[in-house]
């Protein structure tokens, strides 16, 4: 079987949407949950476009809310595949908000979603390999390798750490908690 490879650029997708009063939270800013919903949609579209298959969200690895988004701003989300495994992809998404009156653009969010390609029966399916054509593609790929390694290290620590040991419980004294076991 010949392995198919696609460029990062072939996965590029962007969406723009005007932020309406119905999208706000109690403080009058655009609700983070609404932005998360849009992020999930663009991650799905990007992963599906790249893989040629239906994709599901395996994990939301990082969501950094950097600046608030105001009503009336034009939000643009840009997504691309940053990393591929056998059936999974890490999708990087950049969110920018533009003040339509002034033209000022601010970076509001950076997010990383792990998406998995599925066949018609819901089974994982092999996806194309990734062609890294630019230094930025290579940088993003290496950052994903580092992110995966950190996640594995965290999971290993989770499995091996004894939360009930005397030393562990003693170390909690420096935090703003009251232990009532």
Image (tube, rainbow, N blue to C red):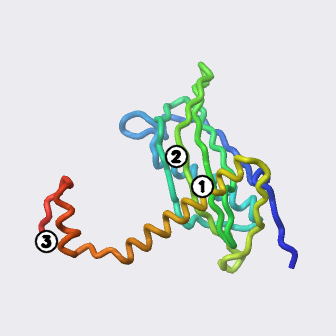
State the mark number for residue 35: 2
Mark sitting earlier along the chain (1/3): 1
Element type where label 3 sits in the image = loop
> Picture coordinates of residue 141 (x, y %)?
66, 57
Given residues 137 and 56, the one toward you in this image is 137
Q: Nearer the viewer, mark 1 or mark 2?
A: 1
Residue picked out by circle 3: 181
Element type where label 1 sits in the image = helix
Residue picked out by circle 1: 143
Q: Residues within 10 Å of mark 1 (few under 14, many from 20)?
A: some
Image point (76%, 48%), residue name: 134
Image point (75%, 54%), residue name: 8
Most extreme residue toward the right is 2
How far is disc 1 from disc 2 in space, using C-alphas? 24 Å
Given residues 97 and 23, the one toward you in this image is 97
How far is disc 1 from disc 3 in space, using C-alphas? 40 Å
Q: Is residue 181 above or below residue 14?
A: below
């Amino acid at each position: 079987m010949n392995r198919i490879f696609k460029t990062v650029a072939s996965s590029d997708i962007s969406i723009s949407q005007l932020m309406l009063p119905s999208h706000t939270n109690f403080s009058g800013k655009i609700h983070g949950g609404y932005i998360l919903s849009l992020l999930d949609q663009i991650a799905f579209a990007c992963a599906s476009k790249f893989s040629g298959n239906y994709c599901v969200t395996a994990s939301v690895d990082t969501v950094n809310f950097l600046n608030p988004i105001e009503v009336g701003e034009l939000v643009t989300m840009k997504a691309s595949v940053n990393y591929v495994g056998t059936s999974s992809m890490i999708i990087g998404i950049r969110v920018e908000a533009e003040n339509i009156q002034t033209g000022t653009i601010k970076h509001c969010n950076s997010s990383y979603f792990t998406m998995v390609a599925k066949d018609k029966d819901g089974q994982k399916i092999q996806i194309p390999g990734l062609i890294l054509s630019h230094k930025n593609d290579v940088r993003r790929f290496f950052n994903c390798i580092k992110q995966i390694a950190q996640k594995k290290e965290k999971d290993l620590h989770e499995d091996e750490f004894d939360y009930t040991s005397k030393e562990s419980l003693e170390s909690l004294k420096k935090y703003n908690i009251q232990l009532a076991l």
